[in-house]
Image (cartoon, rainbow, N blue to C red):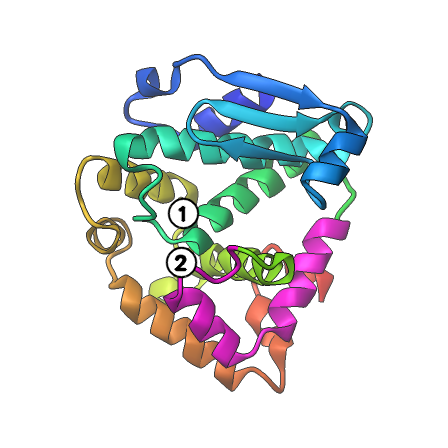
Amino acid sequence: MAAWRFDASRMRWTDPRGMEAPLTLRLISVQRMKTEHAGLLGFAWGRDLFVVSLAVLDDPFANGTLAHELAHIQAKRALGKVSEKGLVPRYFIEGHGNIMGRAYRDYLGITKHNYDAGKARLILRLTGEEARTILTDNSFGAKDPKDMDKMEAMGIFFMEYLRVRLHGRGFPDVVERMGRVFELVGRGQTYQGAFQTEFGASVDRVAADIINFFRHTESHPAERLRGTRYEQFV
């Protein structure tokens, strides 16, 4: 509940009552999670089910997993009936989950950053062509766990790009603007239209700029993280 309230307070949903439907929590053993959902501590299923491993009871770092996955559920509730139609790209959804997980760990003062450092290293290794594929092919990472990791890393970078680089100044309130994108799509707008409304730029133009940026920094990738929350891991 603390993670849920943290996410809700940061997102500032315009219709908080839409978040209040019952949520089922399924707590399963560490071994079952490893066997059935290798590599995960928890996951959201639709708008009303959250499955989590008992490992969260022993590992403070897992608080980030709680905030990450519950952010997915809140985003899906904002999207409403279209939440499973793939109208919002997976890199945007995972970027949102990751930014909320990181923010909650920072809020709690958790100093374990192995996960964040790993995502930073992935961002440095991505090629311009991989960036293009992730930002234009919404099926990327749907089956292969390694591709899923790359897609999540790109999602993190995409959010940081919006926060510190877009229009030369960035949007410090990127989290709230992301929330409005989910809500606008839930009310019938396209993702492209909602993104334009909130960020004042075409998502296709932003994606093209990021792809070019990745191509131009393949020989000096540390530049990608300059000024971001992940610069410390270079």
The correct choice, above or below, for 220 with respect to 190 in the image is: below
The residues colored magenta run 114-142
Residue at left 45%, top 55%?
91
Query: x%, y% of residue 129?
Result: 49, 80
Label for residue 174?
1
Q: Considering the numbered disc 2 on the image, is that residue within a helix, a strand or a loop?
A: loop
Q: Which residue is mark 2?
A: 170
Q: Which quarter of the picture shows residue 183?
A: top left
Do the residues bearing badges 1 and 2 touch, measured as CB atoms within 8 Å? yes
**Circle 2: residue type:** Gly
Look at discs 1 and 2 and give the one toward the viewer.
Answer: 1
State which quarter of the image contains the C terminus. Answer: bottom right
Q: Nearer the viewer, residue 221 or 163?
A: 221
Residue at left 28%, top 37%?
82
State which quarter of the image contains the N terminus. Answer: top right
Most common SS among magenta residues: helix
Q: Nearer the viewer, residue 205 or 29?
A: 29
* Separation (CA) of disc 1 from disc 2: 8 Å
The correct choice, above or below, for 89 with respect to 74 in the image is: below
